Image (cartoon, rainbow, N blue to C red):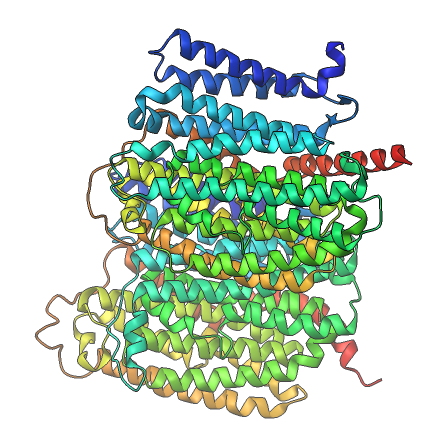
Amino acid sequence: MSGLLLSSVVAMPFIAALILLFVPDRNRLGVRIISPLGAGYSLLASGLVALRYDVAVGGFQLAETHALVPSFGIAFRFAVDGWGVSLLLLTGLVIVAGVLASWTLDDRSKNFFITLLVLVTGVFGVFVSQDLFVFFLFYEIAVLPMYLLIGIWGSSHAVTEAGPFKFVWRLFDIGGREYAAMKLTLMLLVGSAFIIAVMLAMYLATGAGSFDMQVLGAFDYDRSLQMWCFPLLWLGFGALAGVFPFHTWSPDGHASAPTAVSMLHAGVLMKLGAFGIMRVGFMMLPEGAVAWAPLVGCVAVVNIVYGALSAMSQRDLKYVVAYSSVSHMGVVMLGAATLTVEGWNGAVYQMFAHGLMTGLFFALVGLVYGCAHTRHMPSMGGFGLRMPGVATFFTLACLSSLGLPGTAGFVAEILVFIGAWKSLHPWWAIPGILGAFITAVYVLRAARRIFWGEGPAEEFHDLSDAKGVEWGALVILGGCIVLFGFMPSLILDFINRVTPDHLAVLTRLMEPR
Amino acid sequence: MSWDQLSPLGLDLLLAGGILLLLLADMIFPRLGRGNAKLTAAILAAVLAASFAVDTSGSTIGGAYVGGTWPLLFKRIFLIAGIIATLGSSAHVERCYPMRQGEYYLLLLFSLLGMTLLAGTQDLILLLVCFELMSLPLAVLAAFDKNDRDSGEQRTPEGALKFYLVGITSTAITLLGISLLFGMAQTTNIAQLGAADPTPLSTLGMLLVLSGLGFKIGVVPFHMWVPDTYQGSGTPFVSLLSVAPKLAGFAVFSLLFLQGLGGWSHDWVPAIAALSLVTILVGNLLALPQTNVKRLLAFSGVAQIGYMLMAFASANAEGLGVLLFYAAGYTVTNMGAFLIVQAVAAAGGDDSIDSFDGLAQRAPGLALSMLLFLLSLAGIPFVVGFWGKLYVFIAAWNAGLGWLVVVGAVLAVVALFYYLQVARAMYIHPAREQRRVAVSRSLQLAIIICIAFVVGMGVWPNPFVEATSEAARHFFAIIDASASSSH
């Protein structure tokens, strides 16, 4: 069994989805048992992966290979390094929490869980793939179900039409879930077109007839090829990572998506983009990466500040959280662009921490919206009296979001800022810290607006605290935020074990000749 | 002449025997009714089974016809397409023209015979005869719906007449071009068409052939007839019309251009690449505003032809193999999509996108199948269309057509937009009526066959890739053999 451990992590959600296909629609209980089982297995197996991974040895472990298209050198090559271990754990945690948070969904719940499980198969697949082609295949599987998930189960919000382009808003139904679903799908697929072009260019340039990432990574590409391939990859994966100015799908998409999908998408999927940039862009095209890193870092800084400012001016609660994701993904990209060990550790740790935090945020927003039937913040207030548990966890997520010591968010941000300070562009740390400050302003303001103050107005009569399994989602994510805030080494050891190796080529390139 | 010498034609002779059988059965048992469809499917299945048992290699009729893996692959694809079309037509034919069932399947088989013969021809005259044997029955079939009371508008006669007139005009143009080529080369042997250096007159002949064939396969700017004919004709028939004649057209393209005029490739490759560019561009953009699924699939089909032309423009064995793989995948995908349009229309809807509203609730299986077909057409992983597009891009890139690849990749995203319009109607829009969609057994079977291929070739493309590239290599072996024998 140990030989197929990674395959089973990837395959089990898909198998659960296949089984669900044959469960009758009316059998709600069956659906609600099988989906958490599929997701839960992957979480447990991810935990097992973490146990099996020998930190002392490092590198890629638990490797397995299954041929797919031998004539093109494509195979399911699975293996994990320290980064993969931590991101697998994150995915497992968020999907389990997501399934628990969607427990009460009634509308076509079977189809919802099937699509969700297929999506998460793709996410797991990306994190373990060591074959660039399979990496891309799983990436597509992770992206495409979003169209249906948002289009069918999403919610539309009332946009205030304003300005000279009002008619455009009405024309395209901006803010509607179908608009959001289509926008997200098309933007991400344009990104995929870039990725596939680079992938083919790299494949043909090596001439080795293999998509094995070890082979592709070891090849010394022409400087000119790296110079045009890296920005394309950055834009391609960056579209998913929410890189400015290609982040615009993300607020619309996350705001329209149903709770579990927002959790998974903001919590894990956006990390696929950042992971892709680091794993393929930075590590496989080092010369291009060194040359373009200043731009990547500057844009990341824009992401942090612009995302935070945008979040500050939103009135729709989900948009606040969505823009905060854009801002926090900027921290990840900033960490990557520093090209320092601290920065990279921080980037991967931020992926982990932000995944937990934003997953918790969206779960809570879903709960609030479920009772209040509105996401319009100015009309809320005093909810804390009726939903103390939700208020507590929301405050916890806020504190992690602004980077309070003792939460996972702090560890990540401090690492990234140290990395930025040690990098060739120390000034990056200043707007980065400014972003963290603005974050404090808008998250605390949101928490005060919603939960504190006088008791809730008359219209919110059916407010109630989280119920039953919903607690499970909150406790898992909230608990992990605190746990990994106090004991970052649980995850950081895995990450730090491989970062210096991954960074070695880049460091050599940057040394003055 | 002994049987052995005819072995390259064995399958076609078997099919011809089947046609006679159907003819006799139709005459002796006038009330055969639905039995016609069963008999037709059985004949095609028998020939398909025989294709795995019979050795068809070698050449016959004085070298005018060759066998082997190259023509065999075409035969198999056409036979499978024929089986799918027969199964898919069965219910429609029985309901709409109950008294003319025998005729319908006879014409279908005659057309298929023309197709299966095509790829092995090595002689211009034989080639034209086969091509017309394919085309003329199709023109009759296109007009078969003319008495259908359901369509109050005069779409069927219009579409059928357009198809017929365009068909004979393009044949005339092709013939004129071929006669010019013949005049220069003084031979009807395809292999020696391009033996002499090109002259202005033979270049004109080549361009005429190109435009004549362009009409047949619906390349922009010769595509105007495609949407009207598709919209006007019976949908199960359109499922065949949208794929098989195109593939046959590419067989002719390969014979005339790769084999006959292979030496002039620097003349025709730019022309094909340019045609590919405008076809992808115009086909995808014109599909965007469509509200009728048949018209949408028609324009998307035009765009798909553009991608096949892109592969053809590589002008080497790799490109040809890729083209065959793409065309095979396109065949099962597009047929499946049209058959689902038929299923929805037969259950009380029409061809508009609106009639797909809420299909996911009314008929989850149909909706999921349609989604898979649409994703395959759009080129999304784990269905066959993805590998097709990918291989086409690799082949074109290798052949130095990087600019075409970029345009093709960007427009593939545009295409996703209109394919998703249908998906959106099926999954997101609420159903207008709650009635479940009843689908006849035979149509179900046809759709299942399509799904099996679309998913099978998508998940495990390797055997199919090997088969198509083997066929392409065999074709280039034929070219080499004929070139060396003529010296």
Q: Residue at x 63, y 43 (%)?
A: B174
Res B291 → quadrant? bottom left
Position of A404 with respect to B484 (left or right) is left
- Quadrant that contains the N terminus of chain B: top right
Q: Which quadrant of the rendered structure holds the C terminus of chain B?
A: top right
For residue B468, above or below residue A178: above
Count of numbered badges drawn on the protein: 0
Of B333 and A299, which appears nearest the observer?
A: B333
Q: Is residue A406 visible?
A: no
Q: Is residue A237 visible?
A: yes
Q: Residue at x 41, y 21 (%)?
A: B103
Residue A58, image quadrant:
bottom right
Name the residue at the right extreme: B487
In the depicted structure, whether residue A391 falls above or below residue A146 = below
Between A143 and B434, the one nearer to me in the picture: B434
**Considering depth in this image, is B29 or A228 the residue closer to the camera?**
B29
In the displayed structure, does residue A431 sit left or right of residue A55?
Answer: left
Q: Is residue B469 above or below residue A382?
A: above
- Horizontal side, residue A62 vs residue B288: left or right: right
Q: Is residue A143 left or right of residue B421?
A: right
Locate residue B59, reporting x and y percent: 77, 23
Residue at (62, 79) in percent of width and height: A337
Q: Position of residue A286 (x, y in %)?
A: 72, 72
| Relative image position of residue A384 (x, y in whole percent) | 21, 75
- Establish if A425 lies above or below A339: below
Residue A206 at x, y percent in the picture: 78, 59
| In the foreground, B195 or A396 | B195
Q: Residue reaching furthest left? A: A458
Residue reaching furthest top? Answer: B28
